[in-house]
Amino acid sequence: MASIFSKIISGEFSAYKIAEDENCIAILDINPLVTGHVLVIPKKEIDNLFDIDDELYQALWLFAKQISFAIKKAIPCQRIGVAVIGLEVPHAHIHLVPLQTVGDINFTQSKMHPSQEELQETMEKIRKFV
């Protein structure tokens, strides 16, 4: 069964897309830890990050690096935190989280529930720098 990310990649489900290339896609997390929380996802559906072949693994991290620079320019923060959890969706992905404090990347905290307008605005801010 296709993951929700595969359905986004195929266009079956919509998402707030920041950028994509032939191997990867970056989308806003719709229930972010903080404003500007982005998910970087390989287009190939692979459950575990460390099962990705070396070429795609490198492409994924280079793509994430590019997206992190765009987030940092668009969202006021001290730095961009990185997390790979992999328990909630069976499709490898990287969380890029704008940080003011270490608590901003605490996945046990309550998530935000921004409006569609807020998500659209955040997407547009980040996209300007991709």
Image (cartoon, rainbow, N blue to C red):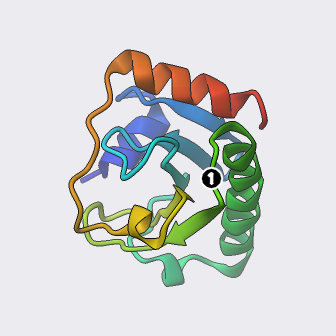
Residue at 66%, 45% in the rendered image? 71
Q: Answer with the quarter of the image where residue 90 lies.
A: bottom left
Q: Amino acid at mark 1?
A: Cys
The residue where tag 1 is placed is 77
Residue at 36%, 53% in the rendered image? 33
Side of 36 relative to 30 (left or right): right
**Residue 101, image x and y in percent?**
49, 66
**What is the secondary structure assignment of the residue under circle 1?**
loop
Q: Quadrant of the C terminus?
A: top right
Q: Is residue 22 above or below residue 47?
A: above
Q: Nearer the viewer, residue 32 or 103?
A: 103
Q: Nearer the viewer, residue 62 or 124?
A: 124
Residue at 74%, 64% in the rendered image? 59
**Residue 126, image x and y in percent?**
66, 34
Q: Nearer the viewer, residue 27 or 92?
A: 27
**Residue 124, image x and y in percent?**
62, 23
Side of 117 relative to 130 (left or right): left
Residue at 38%, 71% in the rendered image? 47
